[in-house]
Amino acid sequence: MQFLFPIDNDCPESLRKAFFDALKDSSVRRLADEAAQSAAQLSAKFGRLAEIRQAVLLAESTGASPADCLRDRIADLRAQDTGMRQHSADLDCYMKAQRERFRAEIGRCAAVLIDSPLKIEALRAKVHGYGDARAEMSARLREAGLDDDAIQRAGVKPDPSDLAEWTSQIADEEERVRRAQVFVASAPLFDTTLLRGIV
């Protein structure tokens, strides 16, 4: 596997997922920043001594001068910087490609995240107004000349089955929103199993 293993085709899915989960975890990112800062501080304080020590040991084993060993070390570090910039660009490219690959699914989730809250609000208004709507319908039927027995036989809308249907629809829409949010948050791997039955 290459250095940036999560975008390597040979990377096991569990390892790829673990990497992107860690990358999204704010506490892991904070700790990684702290570790990098600590390493930089240590290097700033004692780097010269450590580098000279290492150069002398390397010079002793290779026959090169400590200065030549340090020049090689500097060249290697510069190459690592270039390599890390490329790895970072590769990771950005991978994430962009993933968003493009799942553009249709992301779009459908966006529609769910926009439309479902409006549907939920409208359904909750119906549930909230259920009693008033029944009372209003009964009053209209009385004004039309029906007595209580005739109203009972005709049935008043909305009825308990309407209320149960609205409640069920609210739960369904809330689940669609939850799954759409989790799908979008699963970027850049995008867990398509979350989309079954919601888009």
Image (cartoon, rainbow, N blue to C red):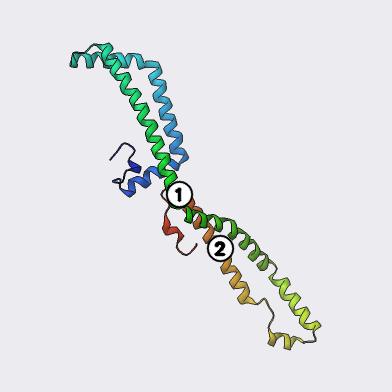
Q: Mark 1: which amino acid?
A: Glu
Q: Position of residue 130 (x, y in %)?
A: 68, 71
Q: How dense is the environment of label 1, judged by Cα within 10 Å: few (below 14), some, or many (20 and up)?
A: few
Q: Quadrant of residue 89?
A: top left
Element type where label 1 sits in the image? helix
Up the image or down, 127 lies above or below 34; here it is below
The alpha-carbon separation of the residues under discs 1 and 2 comes to: 26 Å
Seen from the viewer's position, the closer of residues 20 and 69 is: 69
How many labels sit on residues? 2
Q: Mark 2: which amino acid?
A: Glu
Does the CB distance between marks 1 and 2 fall below 8 Å?
no
Q: Quadrant of residue 119?
A: bottom right
Q: Quadrant of residue 42?
A: top left
Q: How dense is the environment of label 2, judged by Cα within 10 Å: few (below 14), some, or many (20 and up)?
A: many
Q: Residue at x 61, y 69 (%)?
A: 166
Q: Say which residue label 1 marks.
A: 100
Q: Residue at x 57, y 67 (%)?
A: 169
Q: Quadrant of the N terminus?
A: top left
User: Which of the two marks, 1 or 2, is nearer to us in this view?
Assistant: 1
Element type where label 2 sits in the image? helix
Q: Residue at x 49, y 51 (%)?
A: 184
Q: Position of residue 20 (x, y in %)?
A: 40, 44
Q: Say which residue label 2 marks.
A: 173
Mark number displayed over residue 155: none
Task: Tell me: 134 left or right of 4.
Answer: right
In terms of sequence position, does the residue under pointer 1 or pointer 2 come before the other?
Answer: 1
